[in-house]
């Protein structure tokens, strides 16, 4: 992976661009003086020394005292774990101390961009307390195998609608830990034969219902242009649930007819 990409990922752990470059340099070269780090990174010595001081403050580097002061990177896994624990503590304090606002019923919220949609799905799944219905093409559902298995461990009812059972859930499916409906098209949605030409438009569509109270639906292809609608509006959720129930009935009828050779 290119250094620029690695530096960008490190920014999620609180490091600025130059700090990330210096940290990567320490990881790759071991203990260095400020002069050596400046020479290797091409960053000015004054900025390198400021960056090294900041890395030490962030818990990303150790300062080694000796004849010459050197800096040693904290191992990447240790640094990331430490930052995650720190952020978890900050989250707990915020939740405990920031007063909650009284919120009215949510309207219709548009969520744009794959990363934001991914975060919303993750949060919805983690907050489920009774049941989930999740429809999408198999390649997308495979990304959620770990979270879906956790739901099953918590005895949450899981219903999946897709063109295939995700590979990582094959064992759970064999043990009947969740319900699976195979769609008549590989897009995670029932598609009558006469509308087969619409299949490319359907590919990437997802639908998620949590606890019969929250709905997320839209198109996800892994890009910044992905777009989903999220709502807890009771009327919309009710209509959405009914549409999914009808879809399941159509799938069941189709399977029954296939078994009977019709």
Image (spheres, grey):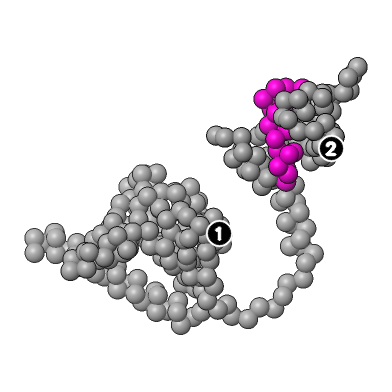
- Region of the chain picked out in magenta, as a range: 13-32
The relative height of residue 230 versus residue 71 in the rendered view (above or below) is below
Q: Going 72% across and 56% down the picture, which residue do you hit?
A: 91
Res. 253 image quadrant: bottom left
Instruction: Please tell me whether mark 1 sits on a helix, a strand or a loop.
Output: helix
Q: Is residue 199 visible?
A: yes
Q: Main secondary structure of the magenta part?
A: helix
How far across and how far down the image is residue 23, in percent?
72, 33
Q: Which mark is residue 95?
A: none
Instruction: Examine the structure image and report whether residue 19 is included in the region drawn in magenta.
Output: yes
Q: Going 54% across and 55% down the picture, which residue do you hit?
A: 115
Q: Going 88% across and 19% down the picture, which residue do you hit?
A: 68
Determine crowd level at label 2: few under 14, some 14-19, many 20+ residues with C-alpha closer than 10 A: few
Q: Going 29% across and 60% down the picture, which residue do you hit?
A: 200
Give the farthest residue toward the right.
67
Disc 2 designates what residue?
Answer: 50
Q: Is residue 157 visible?
A: no
Res. 81 image quadrant: top right
Disc 1 designates what residue?
Answer: 116
């Amino acid at each position: 992976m290119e250094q620029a990409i690695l530096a960008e990922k490190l920014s999620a752990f609180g490091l600025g661009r130059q700090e990330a470059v210096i940290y990567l340099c320490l990881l790759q070269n071991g203990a260095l003086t400020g002069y050596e780090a400046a020479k290797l990174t091409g960053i000015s010595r004054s900025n390198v020394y400021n960056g090294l001081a900041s890395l030490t403050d962030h818990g990303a580097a150790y300062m080694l005292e000796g004849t010459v002061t050197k800096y040693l990177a904290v191992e990447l896994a240790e640094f990331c774990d430490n930052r995650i624990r720190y952020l978890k503590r900050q989250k707990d304090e915020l939740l405990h101390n920031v007063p909650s606002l009284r919120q009215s019923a949510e309207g219709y919220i548009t969520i744009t961009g794959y990363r934001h949609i991914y975060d919303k799905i993750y949060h919805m799944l983690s907050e489920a307390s009774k049941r989930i219905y999740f429809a999408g093409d198999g390649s997308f559902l495979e990304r959620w195998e770990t979270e879906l298995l956790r739901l099953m461990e918590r005895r949450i009812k899981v219903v999946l609608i897709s063109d295939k059972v995700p590979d990582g859930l094959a064992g759970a499916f064999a043990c009947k830990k969740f319900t699976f409906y195979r769609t008549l098209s590989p897009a995670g949605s029932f598609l009558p034969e006469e509308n087969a030409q619409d299949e490319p438009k359907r590919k990437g569509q997802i639908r998620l219902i949590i606890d019969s109270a929250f709905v997320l639906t839209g198109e996800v292809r892994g890009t910044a242009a992905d777009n989903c609608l999220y709502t807890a509006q009771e009327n919309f959720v009710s209509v959405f649930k009914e549409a999914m129930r009808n879809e399941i009935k159509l799938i069941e009828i189709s399977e029954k007819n296939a078994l009977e050779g019709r």
